[in-house]
Image: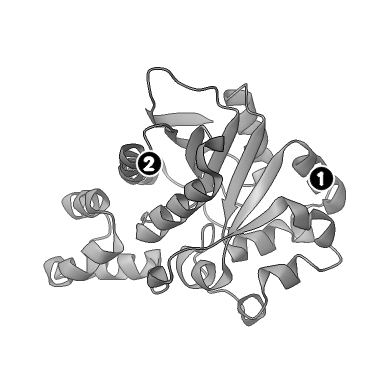
Amino acid sequence: MIIHHQYTLENDRKEEHVLVLGSSFNPPTNAHLGLLTASINLLGETISHVLLLIASNNPDKPAISDQIMKYRTDMMDCIAQDLHSTYPFLTIMVVSTPHGMFIDQEQDIRSTLLTVKKIYFIMGYDTLVRFFDKKYYTSISMSEVLSSFFMNGNEILCAERPLTCSILKLNNDSECSKEIRDQSLQSFMSQDDTMEFAQYVREVSVDKDLSDLSSSKVRLLLSMKSETEYASELTKLLPSNVYHYVTTHHIYSP
């Protein structure tokens, strides 16, 4: 795991309880910031560190180039600065990993932050569905792998379904399937393959005002020839320092 940016207090607390948001951050939006804020408020001062994590390799996406990684981590740094100003008692870190699977990311985090006891992974609902998809567990049974994962002291915070399908798409920009849209978190975690792990999954409520906000919408607006025409709308979708960064560097311009 590579640490790109870090904000911390001088009297740093041990990294015992860590909150992790893994996303493509393409770009990071007010939805990402809202989800992080809701998760931090849910857990309170039980956590000491927040990790904004991007995987350079993803089983469902092409690998990220060095230049794109630089843009993404710089934009993630904008979110980190906002979080640190709001929650100065937390250490905020922007990190990357070559591992696309949460199982491997957990080991990477623990090998870097040696005193970690508990990790809370934030997932969108569609990402949660993929996490419990047997096709990603070929050499060892999913039940065996996930039993070990949760026994290590890991939990999942899942954003409520309407937000994750229309906004976050944390690790996949494709539309959520109708089956995913129509299924509640509770019913999904009551299925035969998931019910034994239901106690490790908690739902996070996020402001409904974010329901129309998506990274793909932001990219579309930024790709328009007249970027300034959509400035007022973009400032509602992006944190101010992210908006300044993407418009200064013209990352999504045609």
In the rendered view, would you say 234 is above or below 155? below
Question: Which disc, if any, is residue 250?
Answer: none
Q: Residue at x 39, y 29 (%)?
A: 6
Image quarter where the C terminus lies is bottom left
Q: State the SS at label 2.
A: helix
Lateral position of residue 92 relative to residue 150, left or right: left
Residue highlighted by disc 1: 145
Can you tell which quarter of the image residue 229 is in? Answer: bottom left
Q: What percent of the width, then of the height, locates residue 235?
A: 22, 62
Q: Residue at x 50, y 33 (%)?
A: 49
Q: Residue at x 63, y 28 (%)?
A: 116
Q: How is the image coloured?
A: one colour
Image quarter where the N terminus lies is top right
- The crowding category of the residue bearing disc 2, from other C-alpha atoms within 10 Å (few below 14, some 14 to 19, many at least 20), is many
Q: What percent of the width, then of the height, locates residue 46?
A: 56, 36
Instruction: Give the number of callouts.
Output: 2
- The crowding category of the residue bearing disc 1, from other C-alpha atoms within 10 Å (few below 14, some 14 to 19, many at least 20), is few
Residue highlighted by disc 2: 73
Q: What percent of the width, then of the height, locates residue 112?
A: 58, 24
Lateral position of residue 245 relative to residue 8, left or right: left
Front residue (pair 175, 93): 93
The numbered mark, 2 or 1, whose residue comes first in the sequence reads: 2
Specify whether residue 68 is in view.
Answer: yes
Q: What percent of the width, then of the height, locates residue 24?
A: 46, 53
Kindly indicate whether the residue at mark 1 contacts the one at mark 2 (C-beta within 8 angstroms).
no
Q: Mark 1 is on which residue type?
A: Val
Front residue (pair 7, 24): 7
In the rendered view, would you say 116 is above or below 178? above
Q: Mark 2 is on which residue type?
A: Thr
